[in-house]
Image (cartoon, grey):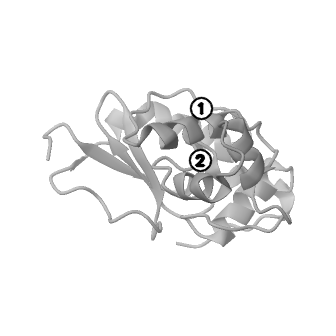
Amino acid sequence: MSKNLCYTELKSPIGPIFIEGTEDAVTGLHLAGHKHWNGLKEGSRPSDAAFAEVRAQLDQYFAGDRREFEVSLKLAGTPFQDRVWQALCAIPYGETITYGELACRVGVPSASRAVGAANGRNPVSILVPCHRVVATNGKLTGYGGGLEAKRWLLDWEGGQKSLLPRITD
């Protein structure tokens, strides 16, 4: 593994968040126990300084002072996954769309299951807002960080701030 690979841990209202990458770009953002995350990469070193900007922006998000992120990302995915992740970034703060609508946005209306799979493989939850996608019936499905965290994020963005307890570690 690269000597430049580093990580930091950020405490948040939805539990610990692990941020991975290099000093130039974020490559991963995962909640503890994230479904498609196998833990920190071997050989990575702790570095809060490498992620000072993304940490500050996440703190602002959880304080209610930020709705979009401006951080350098380096995502490893297929061309289809890249299209899905780009489309996720276009979903406005506080809004949701369905997997079917997301499939239409990437130009493959019949591919809602493939879009769901790509959504689930998003390596930078919250920064690329995969939590904003719901089932056609409006139910919450398929969030790698857990449905409780997805519900919290959607309620947070929807203005329910005063009603939200912290999710414990």
Q: Check whether the beta carbons of the residues at disc 1 and disc 2 lie within 8 A of each other.
A: yes
Identity of the residue drawn at 53% across and 52% down:
118
The x, y position of residue 26, in whole percent, is: 39, 37
The x, y position of residue 56, in whole percent, is: 53, 36
Q: Looking at the image, can residue 17 be seen?
A: no
Q: Nearer the viewer, residue 88 or 125?
A: 88
Q: Nearer the viewer, residue 73 or 7?
A: 73
Q: How many marks?
A: 2
Q: Which mark is residue 2?
A: none
Secondary structure beneath dot 2 equals loop
Q: Is residue 68 left or right of residue 134?
A: left
Secondary structure beneath dot 1 equals loop
- Mark 1 or mark 2: name the one nearer the start of the chain: 1
> What residue is disc 2 on?
126
Query: How many residues crowd around disc 2 within 10 Å: few (fewer than 14), some, or many (20 or more)?
Result: many
Q: Is residue 122 left or right of residue 158?
A: left
- In which quadrant of the rendered view does residue 138 lie? bottom right
The x, y position of residue 164, in whole percent, is: 78, 64
Query: How many residues crowd around disc 1 within 10 Å: few (fewer than 14), some, or many (20 or more)?
Result: some
- In which quadrant of the rendered view does residue 40 lie? bottom left
Q: What residue type is disc 1 on?
A: Phe
Identity of the residue drawn at 65% across and 37% down:
106
- Which residue extends farthest front? 110
Identity of the residue drawn at 54% across and 50% down:
125
**Real-space Cα separation, disc 1 to disc 2, in angstroms:** 9 Å
Q: What residue type is disc 2 on?
A: Ile
> What residue is disc 1 on?
69
Q: Is residue 31 left or right of residue 159?
A: left
The x, y position of residue 13, in whole percent, is: 63, 60
- In which quadrant of the rendered view does residue 134 lie? bottom right
